[in-house]
Amino acid sequence: MKRSNSNSKQRKRSKKSIEVPVVLWNTDWDRQQITCTQCNQKYLAWNLLFDCPDNQLYLNCPLCTIHLMTVDYSKPSKFTRQMSDLTGDDVKYYDNRINRIDDLNRIKFLANVQKSELKSADQLPEINSDHIIIVWRCNEMTEQIEICHGNIILWKEVRTFQHHERYLKVGQILKEKYGTRLKDFVPHESTWLYLYGDYGPAISMVKDFRNSLQRGNEI
């Protein structure tokens, strides 16, 4: 019986979760190199997967999704006065607080982008056709990119600006899934502003990729 209790205690200890570092938002946390405690892969913190519950940012391993770091955005507000009453250090703190809120909103948006992204060919459905044309279109109501085959939406992602690299990455996943049956990956005109943005070469990059599909060759 004693041995059983001892083994039980050991099992409880082994199941105890590993404490992860907690850092403040105004440090250089995004430049830290982190080694995953499970898969031993090394990453820059900025390249980890984001999750944003409340005023904290959870950084998770992209490979095994284990929680590796927490960035703390919470801080009690000092403000009990009107803006016109703020001077000196209070004004500086106010500016920092606004920057912190903007930064957190931006990171929450990026976290939502990451969660929505197509990551694997296994996430796509089978298509029974030897001549597949897929359309990359924008839904203005939902601000999402819709990846469509005919009237069927294969996948949805959060829309971002100047996302030609994302288009090309999704194109490679589509090629992996459908092979030479994929004849074209058409960017609908509703996406052009967000797809190309201000980057001129993006137009030729997209065109080259589409030509490679029609030739049946890789870029």
Image: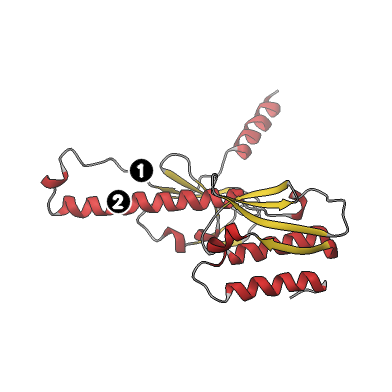
Can you say whether 179 is above or below 217 in the image? above
- In the rendered structure, the answer to whether residue 119 lies left or right of residue 112 reads right
Q: At 76% across and 64% down in the image, what residue appears?
A: 184
In three-dimensional space, the C-alpha distance between marks 1 and 2, rounded to whole angstroms, equals 13 Å
Residue 86 x, y percent position in the rendering: 14, 48
Front residue of 205/43: it is: 205
Q: Is residue 31 left or right of residue 74?
A: right
> Visible in this render: residue 23?
no
Indicate the quadrant containing the N terminus: top left, top right, bottom left or bottom right: top right
* Residue depicted at 58% across the width and 38% down the height: 16
Sequence-wise, the earlier of marks 1 and 2 is 1
Residue type pointed to by label 2: Ile
Q: Position of residue 212 (x, y in %)?
A: 76, 73
Helix, strand or loop for disc 1? loop
Contact between marks 1 and 2 (CB within 8 A): the answer is: no
At mark 2, the secondary structure is helix
Determine which quarter of the picture holds residue 11. Answer: top right
Q: Which mark is residue 98?
A: 2
Which of the numbered marks, if any, corresponds to residue 52? none
Q: 41 or 165, which is in the foreground?
A: 165
Q: Residues within 10 Å of mark 2 (few under 14, many from 20)?
A: few
Tag 1: Cα neighbours inside 10 Å, few (<14), some, or many (≥20)? few
Amino acid tagged 1: Ser
**Residue 206 position within the rendered picture, expressed as x and y whole percent measured from the top left:** 65, 70
Query: Is 62 placed above or below 79 here?
Result: below
**Which of pointers 1 and 2 indicates the residue nearer the eye?**
2
Position of 37 compared to 197: left or right?
right
Q: Which residue in the rendered view is the most extreme toward the top?
A: 1
Q: Which mark is residue 74?
A: 1
